[in-house]
Each structure stands twice: as C-alpha cells, then as structure tokens.
Amino acid sequence: MTVRIVLADDQPLVRAGLRMVIADAPDLEIVGEAGTGTEAVRVVRELRPDVVVMDIQMPGMDGIEATRMITTDTPAPRVLMLTTFDDDNNVYSALRAGASGFLVKDMALDDILAATRVVAAGDALIAPSVTRRLIEEFANRPAAVAPPRRLEGITEREREVLTLVGRGLSNSEIAAELFIGHATAKTHVARLLTKLDARDRVQLVIIAYGAGLVSSSP
C-alpha cells in the first residue's frame, strides 16, 4: 500500500529535499505540494492524501490553523508538523489542532520517512528528544486539556493500558508490563481510541494526564 503525501512548507529547498528522498521510497508518494497554509487546505481537500507534512511557520494562514481545518474533515489525513521547536507554544497549539506527530527539521531524512510510515499506520509520533518534556508540559497546562473527567465506559484493564500509554510505553512494552500478548495490547489501545473518541496515541496520552492517571513528577 502506497502512502500518499502532501508537502506543505514555504521553503522550496525543504520541499525539494523531502521530495528527493521520498522519490526513492517505493511505499511513499508525493501527490501534492503547498507553500502556504491556505494552499495546503485546498490541496489536501482536493487530493485526500494519507499524510500531510506541515511546516508550522508559513505566511498568511500558518500550519497550525491549516491543521485545525484539515483535521475537522472526514476522513481526515494524519498531520506531521515540521518545526525547529524554537517556541513550544506553537507545538502545544499544534497538538490542540489535531497534529499526530512532530519532527524537527534537522532530523535525518530517513527518520522523517520512518515517522511518516508510523503516522500513516495510525500511530502517533513525536521526536524522541522532546517527547516526555513536551507531553508533560502540555498536559499540565490549564488550557491544554479539558477539565478532569471521569473515564466512563472503559474496563479496569483498559484503564491500566491507558496509564501505560500515558507513560509513553509502546504496545510491545505494554504487553510485557501486563503479561499479555502484543495483539491483545494493540486491541486494548484500539478500543480506547474508539471509546474515548481520541484521534491517535498523542490524544490518549493527554487524556491519561488529564484524568490523573499519570503524574509529571519524577
């Protein structure tokens, strides 16, 4: 299955670099490009890609607002935000807008390709260098999450799984922690996504923090 991608970045050199490396990946295909947020929304709605690689800083409508508009569509593509992490506030806003992943522009191109595949498969990804700090700071900001709510409709086992997702564990790590099969762990995560109306794993992490299942304390 080929992952269809739209590149949205106001720097032609960045798009050209990504285009060159993606051209060598048989399972990835660039179907469109955009240089502004407004253009990105139009191109995405026309072409319906699987993944949008979106720069945060663009003239006019920025990548955050474009992401907010794109992720309200049904079906909505996954959005990978490209950032330098100069301003964490932008990253928090992108999370709230529905981004499924964050990449820094100086990451190796092969890592960006791998991240695209991860997000296309329905998972969520944040650059490892900022994962824990980003999630903890985001989750503990008053404006970052909804007021604490009771997690109704989930089983005790699903609550345990949600807690481990909130701690940043992968499905394999969750399976080992709870002495269950990898497929069972994956099924629990899928059910949590449905029951909690979460778009992806990033949102599950935020929900776990917001419900008090995970603490940011060392």
Image (spheres, helix red, strand yellow):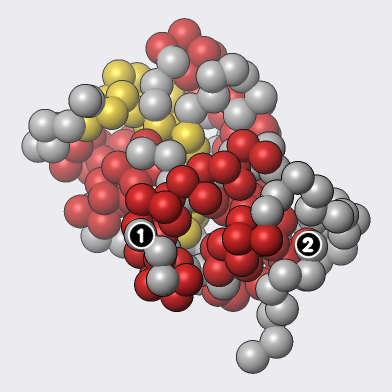
Packing grade of label 2 (10 A; few <14, some 14-19, many >=20) is: many
Of the two numbered discs 1 and 2 in the rendering, the one whose residue sits closer to the viewer? 1
The quarter in which the C terminus is drawn is bottom right
The amino acid on which the numbered mark 2 sits, given as a three-letter code, is Gly
Q: Which residue is mark 2?
A: 210
- Above or below — where is 88 with respect to 186? below
Q: Position of residue 111 (x, y in %)?
A: 26, 56
Q: Position of residue 127 (x, y in %)?
A: 43, 63
Q: Position of residue 118 (x, y in %)?
A: 34, 47
Q: Quadrant of residue 215?
A: bottom right
Q: CA distance from mark 1 to mark 2?
A: 28 Å
Q: Which residue is mark 1?
A: 181
| Residue 206 seen in this snapshot | no
Secondary structure, mark 1, is: loop
The circle drawn on residue 143 is: none
The amino acid on which the numbered mark 1 sits, given as a three-letter code, is Gly
The one nearer the camera, 117 or 150, is: 150
Packing grade of label 1 (10 A; few <14, some 14-19, many >=20) is: some
